[in-house]
Image (cartoon, rainbow, N blue to C red):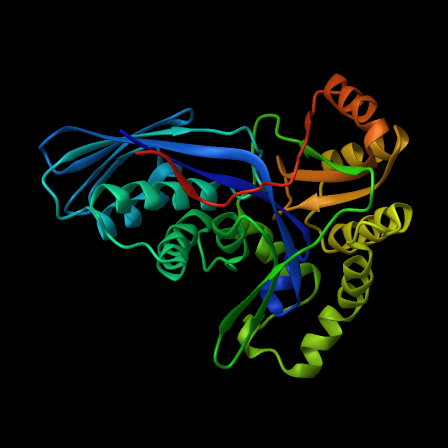
Amino acid sequence: MIVASSPAKIILCGEHYVVYGAPAVALPVDRRNSVELEVIGNEGKLLLESDVGKATIYGNGDFKGEKILEFCKPIYLKLAGDRKETFRARIIFGGAPKGMGNSASIASAMAIAFSRYVNSEMTVDKLFEITQIAENVAHGGKASGIDARTVIAGEAQLFRKTFNPTEFNFKNMKLELPKDTAIVAISTYKDAREGTSQLIERFAMANKIKKKPEELTEKEREELLGSYKSVFNEILNELRIDGNPERLGRLLSKNHELLRNSNVSTEEIDKAIKLAVQNGAYGGKLTGAGGKGGACFALANKKNVDRIVNALNTEGYLAFVANLAKNGARVDRN
């Protein structure tokens, strides 16, 4: 049996704006998803097992089972779809909520496991390419790439998309939170979630965007991104050990206000952030696409973390400390 894992992630700033060319920062966090891969027969298919259900993927591309698992299909077909073995992949969920890069985490772990089994060389670029293909399926459209790159690298990422031609630009960053602070991740999921593609459309409608991202003029792009880019630059300046935590918290909340005005937050997300602040957090914002069932986070002094987590859990939210991950996607057992 081969066991591989990959971390989840938090987008510290840049959701939705990144689609139109704004810079974004993402951090890998230590809620790792794992994939256990083994061979159990010789019928040329992949059996998937997870806490959200089961699915079967055949070598000819047929898929049966839980639709949410279909993002795994291109990984199997690309790396092992022509083989005669029957594979079983058990997905072990690490506990990070929607909006924290679970599909990229699972996809990268699964790709590494398959590549190790078939003795295929897996460079970082190839792993990103395969994970990104799976991400496009999971998101129902072209994913930005920030989730895939962050969980693969296991390091903070500065990301920016440029156009004409479309290119994805990444940079590993040695970023730190201000001294004695921690991130509290929060899930607002109760009984339903909204999809990323739906929220991308809602953001566009709220900002009266009627063109595709690559079709915007530079003037139109600057009008859309100007307010966010000002906040982004200030946030980046505080991401250091001697940064000002109160100011960083206010800036994160200001970023959240922009997203709320773009109609991608929800009453539950806003309520969770407000509750965290009332119990000692410096500020917070949604992370990921947002929407119903989405995730958010708060920046807090470590001495207030337990009080914040308890207050949120008491109100029915799933809250936990999201420590920064020390490793990216990897094989844990061969």
Quarter of the image with the N terminus in it: top left
Residue 283 position by quadrant: top right
Q: Residue 168: in sight, yes or no?
A: yes
Q: How many labels does the image show?
A: 0
Left or right of 52? Residue 192 is right
Left or right of 190? Residue 225 is right
Residue 96 position by quadrant: top right
Which residue lies at the image location 76% right of the left edge and 50% below the top edge? Answer: 260
Using the image, determine if residue 23 lies above or below residue 250.
below
Using the image, determine if residue 11 lies above or below residue 58.
below
Left or right of 3? Residue 151 is right
Using the image, determine if residue 148 lies above or below residue 282.
below
Q: Where is residue 241 in the image (x, y as percent from the top left)?
A: 80, 49
Which residue lies at the image location 57% right of the left edge and 42% below the top edge? Answer: 326
Quarter of the image with the C terminus in it: top left
Using the image, determine if residue 82 lies above or below residue 316.
below
Q: Where is residue 65 in the image (x, y as percent from the top left)?
A: 29, 32
Q: Where is residue 10 in the image (x, y as percent from the top left)?
A: 63, 45
Left or right of 226? Residue 137 is left
Q: Where is residue 315 in the image (x, y as percent from the top left)?
A: 76, 20
The residue nearer to you, when weighing 157 against 11, is: 157
Q: Residue 270: in sight, yes or no?
A: no
